[in-house]
Amino acid sequence: MAFTAHRLDRQRGSLALEPESLGEGGQGVVTRVLGPEKLVYKEYMPHAGTVNDRALTDLVDFGQNLTPVDRHLLLKHCAWPVARVVGGDRVMGFLMPEVPAEFYGTIGGRSKLVELQYLLFKPNWAWQDLHQPDITGRAEIALLAARLIDLLHGHGFVLGDISFRNLLWRPAPPYKMFVLDCDGFRRHGGEPVLRQAHTPDWDDPYQPATGPDLDTDRYKLALLMGRILACNAQIRPGKELELLPGLEPQVATAIAELFARAGGPRGSRPIASEWAQAILGRRRIIVKRPPIRHVSEPAERVAIHLPGATRGQQPISTPAEQPSSQTPPSTPRMSIPMPPLRSVPSSSPSIPRQSLPVVLSPTGSDAQSHFMTLGERITTSDTFADQRQISPSAISNDQVTMLIDSLAAGGGRLPVAAAATLIQEPVERARLLMGAAKRLLNIDGYHVLTLKDGDQTVALNLQLLKEQFLDEEVDP
């Protein structure tokens, strides 16, 4: 592989390093860089193998292309590569943020990183004074881990080596997490910087011959969840999960069910957002959807007009034709005030100036009707509110509303360039926000929103959207 320089490359000889290293792992030695940047340098050992320059460059570029706010959050929780370090025409290592002091604790009379392992065993003499969270605190730490992995999976990264050694936690409330060895991550379907490492007793028995993938990550996430919440470093799916006492019964049941599911065949393992929903007590039940049959007879049509849009006729369903929502009695839908209607900006390319899809939705005992766009129905639903809490996102509700409505108006497809103009963001920023929208709309592994044509086109499955957020589906 030919060497290609990068604009952020730093020459090895230009680094002012402390004389003593902070430590070393199986692939490299980490040393603090002198100066105000609060960076450390990881230099790969000769036996680590050939460094994939392009894969490391992709990690650096990912962080650089985030908004300042998102980049700050990434570097606050991850030892993410911020620049390659080169010697001549060879990549020797990379720079990354130094682990914040709050992730250190006194262990065996010395200041050490507080790894996840200190949650998986009963305290011994060396760390008996280290803060030990109760079950509520453990659930909070597990939730943080699930959200962080969900975020990285949402951006298409396979973590590979999820274990008790490369996850740190803050040994005091409010709890926080920090991820080490981020250079071991790779894009789904891409190559890693180096051959991905493996931690004994954190292996996936069904890992494919091609190496770790998203499904392998999900198995290891189940190990993480079960071992934190049971304080058991050896428990695996397939064995009875004896959780520490104190969890609410419905939460404990949901976690046990997900843990058991993780022992099933590849493709059936719980995704990160399901763990987050279970811990929050808002788990959605995955059901096998019946085949969808298209309605052959046209519905009765009425004409409506939206303020600010070109007047024209748009077919909508009357109240009598709306599918009934099958909501369990124990979880009634809340009535949420409706936001004002919006129209598509006139400058949006490839978006016709027409009325957006609107559903006539009856409310109250007298069936008084409110006109709402599909996007507004989604973003004001309880399910969407749950998704917001599980996966905090940079894309606003208004932007999601406009995106859904424009996709619905365009038959479920929209160029990313048009979406960027619609939500008033640069194209590169819009692509990142489409990833954020996917994390909000893709529930339980269903591909409701996808990027196609090399991430040039946004596609929306309207039927799945309604099933997941509005409990609407066409009867077979």
Image (tube, rainbow, N blue to C red):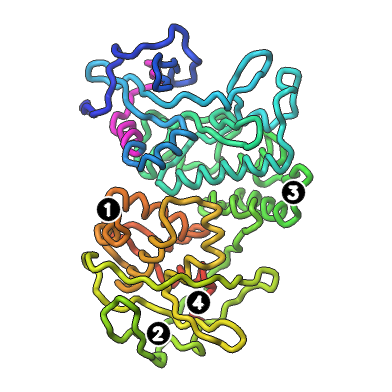
- For disc 1, the marked residue is 454
Residue 314 visible in the picture? yes
Determine crowd level at label 3: few under 14, some 14-19, many 20+ residues with C-alpha closer than 10 A: some
For discs 3 and 2, the disc positioned in front in the rendered view: 2
Q: Quadrant of the N terminus?
A: top left
- For disc 2, the marked residue is 316
Q: Are marks 3 and 2 in contact (CB under 8 Å)?
A: no
Looking at the image, is mark 2 or mark 4 earlier in the sequence?
2
Looking at the image, is mark 4 or mark 3 earlier in the sequence?
3
For discs 2 and 4, the disc positioned in front in the rendered view: 2
* Residue nearest the viewer, comparing 86 with 308: 308
Q: Are marks 3 and 1 in contact (CB under 8 Å)?
A: no
- Which label belongs to residue 247? 3
At x 27% / y 53%, what residue is drawn? 454
Looking at the image, is mark 3 or mark 1 earlier in the sequence?
3
The amino acid type found where label 4 is placed reads Glu
For discs 2 and 1, the disc positioned in front in the rendered view: 2
Report helix, strand or loop for mark 2.
loop
Per the rendered image, the range of residues in magenta is 42-62
Q: CA distance from mark 3 to mark 2?
A: 46 Å
